[in-house]
Amino acid sequence: YEISACLVGSEMCIRDSTIPEGFSVKLALVDLIPVVFFGLSAVRVGSLFHSALFIAGAALCLVSGIVKVLWKGIVAVSGRNVWPLFVQMRVAMPVGFALLLAAVIAGRARLSGAAILAGVTGFPACIFFGLGVLGMALMTVFAFRLDSGDPRSNWLEQGVNGLAQLCFFIGLCLV
């Protein structure tokens, strides 16, 4: 039997026996851009938040993103699909984001809602946060509409994700 990692609405699913075609080293490197900006944003927030739970969640998300980049690099260079490297993201990312959310909930007494709101809505940071949120909304649409095995879809996804993560990072730097 064949195990697959499919999303609702995908035209094609990447399976443990599927070798995606058209994945290049350049695509893998572009896939690293949002990972780097997420990591930088996590360091910025982590330096303000000081939570081991937050650090664990951010580290899990970061490592998961790096492993996905590694998967694309292996596919591009060797033509091999090391399927666990692909599918791990479906588990690790949600767990990492759940830990981030748990850290915020657990540390909410130390947070100033008014200060956060002022930082996020202040000009020009609000422009960057708004663009980042728009990018993440598009990524959600892409998850249900685009074919994860199509390199063109991956270029679009990584371009939008990279810009969104860059916008979040700039917004955080402006706060």
Image (cartoon, rainbow, N blue to C red):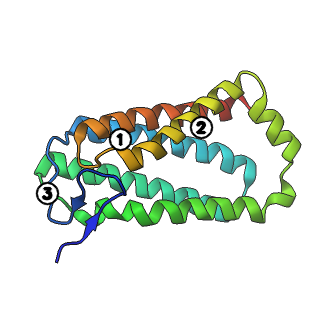
Which quarter of the picture shows residue 114? top right
Residue located at (23% from left, 43% from top): 150
- Looking at the rendered structure, the secondary structure element under dot 3 is loop
Does residue 47 appear to the left or right of 80 in the view shown? right
Image quadrant in which the C terminus is located: top right
27 to 58, vertically: above or below? above
Three-letter code, disc 3: Arg
Q: At which x and y percent is residue 156? A: 35, 34
Q: At which x and y percent is residue 95? A: 53, 66
Image quadrant in which the N terminus is located: bottom left
Q: Which mark is residue 133?
A: 2
Answer whether residue 5 is visible to the viewer in this image: yes
Q: Given the current orientation, which residue lies at the most extreme front position? A: 9
119 to 123, vertically: above or below? below
Q: Which of the two discs, 2 and 3, labels the residue nearer the N terminus?
A: 3
Q: Which of the two discs, 3 and 1, labels the residue nearer the N terminus?
A: 1
Residue identified by numbered label 3: 80
Q: Dot 2, crowdedness within 10 Å: few (<14), some or many (≥20)?
A: some
Residue identified by numbered label 1: 31
Three-letter code, disc 1: Asp
Residue located at (17% from left, 45% from top): 76
